[in-house]
Image (cartoon, rainbow, N blue to C red):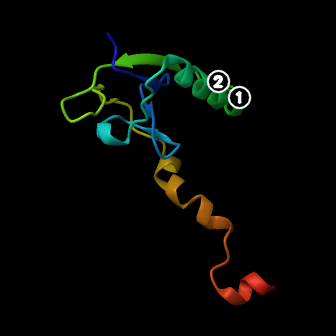
């Protein structure tokens, strides 16, 4: 029996909890879905935003620590994945004076 499902792309990267692709080296940040239909819905949404995406839903067992046991990708992540955390901050003003302008 499968414990969870994960989403993996054609480069063997996994969809992460913070809404960007991760290499699977740190299983704590890999998004996991208890039900397959949740993973299907998420993959459908991802495919709607990126028509070149070739993703798959992969079953994964959970480790004793509750993390999915996934194989880390050998393919390096694109450079823009490192800046995904700062993507929301790019549109916010740096000072309160700029917010009033």
**Camera-side residue of 98 and 12:** 98
Image quadrant containing the N terminus: top left
Relative horizontal placement of residue 33, taking residue 100 as reference (left or right): left
- Measuring 26% from the left and 33% from the top, which residue is drawn there? 66
- Measuring 73% from the left and 84% from the top, which residue is drawn there? 98
Q: CA distance from mark 2 to mark 1?
A: 6 Å
Instruction: Tell me where residue 65 appears, x and y as whole percent.
Output: 21, 36
User: Which residue is identified by label 2?
Assistant: 44
User: Which residue is identified by label 1?
Assistant: 48
Relative horizontal placement of residue 12, taking residue 50 as reference (left or right): left
At numbered mark 1, what does the secondary structure look like: helix, strand or loop? helix
User: How many other residues sit within 10 Å of disc 2, few (<14), some (14-19) or many (≥20)?
Assistant: few
Relative horizontal placement of residue 28, taking residue 36 as reference (left or right): left
User: How many other residues sit within 10 Å of disc 1, few (<14), some (14-19) or many (≥20)?
Assistant: few
At numbered mark 2, what does the secondary structure look like: helix, strand or loop? helix
- Measuring 55% from the left and 24% from the top, which residue is drawn there? 38
Image quadrant containing the C terminus: bottom right
Q: Quarter of the image holding residue 28?
A: top left
3 shown above or below 84 = above
């Amino acid at each position: 029996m499968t414990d969870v499902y994960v989403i993996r792309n054609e480069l063997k990267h996994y969809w992460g909890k913070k809404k960007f692709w991760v290499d699977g080296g740190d299983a704590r940040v890999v998004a996991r879905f208890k039900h397959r239909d949740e993973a299907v819905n998420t993959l459908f949404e991802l495919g709607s935003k990126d028509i070149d995406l070739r993703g798959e839903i992969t079953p994964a067992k959970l480790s004793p620590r509750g993390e999915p046991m996934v194989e880390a990708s050998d393919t390096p992540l694109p450079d823009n994945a490192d800046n995904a955390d700062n993507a929301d901050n790019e549109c916010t003003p740096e000072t309160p004076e700029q917010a009033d302008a």
